[in-house]
Amino acid sequence: MTVRAFRGEILSVPHDPLTNSEAIRHDPDGLLLVEDGIIVARGAYADLAPLYPNVPVETLPGLIVPGFIDAHIHYPQMDRIASHGEQLLDWLDRHIFPAEKAFADRAHADQIAGLFLDELLRNGTTSALVFPTVHAHSVDALFEAALARNMRITSGKVLMDLGPEGLADTPDSGRTESEALIRHWRGKGRLGYAVTPRFALTSSDEQLHVAGQLLADHPDVLMHTHLAENERECAEVAARFPDAADYLDAYDRFGLVGDRSVFAHGIHLSHRACARMQESGAGIAVCPTSNLFLGSGFFDFTRAAQHGLKIGLGTDVGAGTSFSMLHTAGVAYQAGLMRGHRLDPFRALYLATAGSAALLHIEDKVGGLLPGQEADFIVLDPAATPLLARRTAGADLAERLFALQILGDDRAIAGTYVMGARTGRT
Ligand code: GUN
Ligand code: ZN
């Protein structure tokens, strides 16, 4: 058995501060005791240290928080981040689909998968819900690379039978390949599967029906797709599904809306759709840098709170402009203000950790830094840059956290630990 102890300032937000007054857990001088990668005790150093006199203690300078959980990101788009000039549909055609076609080559997929996961770790992200491509082996490449790094990653072959030439599957191949991947990867490492129709416009009714059947046949998998992101997309969905009450309803008709469904964006939602989301337990991965980059709009945090919607935070790279969940949290605050909402820094940390974990149904495993959970954590350096050092000197916890979100990025990640083991990044 490997036992490790980490001493430092520990902060986590295992519950939503909007609805839970005890949501914030803060140990100014804390101890985290880890046995075989699992947290077995957490509390004040002065209380806990005498109970474990023989365990060597590693002192970590900085702020220890849970590893970030990115609730929506595309690994094949890593090298197309910062592609100029278009909104969603033209951006897909001009920049993204050509890049995804290159994943027909397994060696290319392997190479990008490794680079992608290392970039996540460098940014303090230890878990993610990831879009690969339509190619089944793009999932194998990602999962193999995740296993090698012991990361908690959920993904699933993209279903897109109406996709462009070179990127289209069929309802049959989509079903067979998804079934085979689910069978092959179930129970391996820290991996999870998500049935992943790209969005309503790239799947036929027949394929959306297949997606619903896959979910019904495999109650342990997630459903992951895009929803109500960009105005032109929404108009095209309304034209394609004239009988649907709204965009969400187009998915609902095929059994794709349930408490294991994760929808990226959800900017342009009707009240009916919000009520249906709430009733079903489906969640939204809010992706503020992407929403700004593609001119899609601003997520309505106030409306989401009124409806009690389950939300988490995603970068949505390559439409997102940063792998950093710190930076993404800072932009979420600014996007919130555009619609009159003041996102609290502790709630932003919740969304980037336990909130995303709840969307991914892994909240019992990670995100709260609580005993019984896996010891995925990072060390934030509030003095990572000269400006951060000046702004955080003498500041209280809320101010330091907010400054890290507004001014911080990968430079502020002093260390990333996966199941208690420091990763290669630092
Ligand atoms: N909608 C359908 N595909 C995509 C994608 O790759 N990125 C984003 N942001 N939205 C999408
Ligand atoms: Zn996306």
Image (cartoon, rainbow, N blue to C red):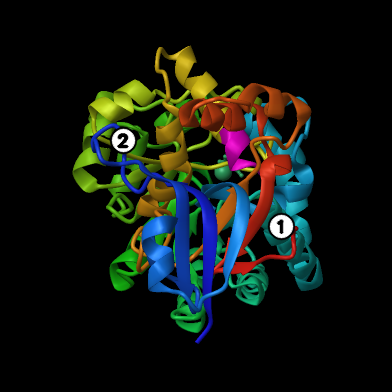
- Residue 325 within the segment the image draws in magenta: yes
Q: Main secondary structure of the magenta part?
A: helix
Position of residue 363 measured from the top left corner of the image (x, y, whole percent): 36, 58
* Above or below for 264 versus 397: below
The CA span between labels 2 and 1 is 32 Å
Seen at 51% across and 83% down, the residue is: 184
The amino acid marked with disc number 2 is Pro
Q: Earlier in the sequence, mark 2 or mark 1?
A: 2
Residues at circles 2 and 1 in contact by the CB criterion of under 8 Å: no
Seen at 50% across and 81% down, the residue is: 188
Kindly indicate the quadrant of the structure image that contains residue 381. top right
Q: In the displayed structure, does residue 41 sit left or right of residue 119? A: left
Location of mark 2 (residue): 17
Q: Quadrant of ligand 1?
A: top right
Evaluate whether residue 160 shows in this view.
no
* Above or below for 104 versus 165: below
Q: What element carries label 1?
A: helix
What's the magenta region? Answer: 323-328
The C terminus sits in image quarter: bottom right
* Above or below for 22 versus 69: above
Nearer to us in this view, 126 or 110: 126
Kindly indicate the quadrant of the structure image that contains residue 169. bottom right
Nearer to us in this view, 149 or 234: 149
Q: In the displayed structure, does residue 334 sit left or right of residue 187? A: right
Nearer to us in this view, 11 or 250: 11
The amino acid marked with disc number 1 is Phe
Location of mark 1 (residue): 116
Q: In the displayed structure, does residue 154 sit left or right of residue 355? A: right
Question: Dot 2: within a 10 Å radius of its alpha carbon, few (fewer than 14), some, or many (20 or more) residues?
Answer: some
- Residue 230 within the segment the image draws in magenta: no
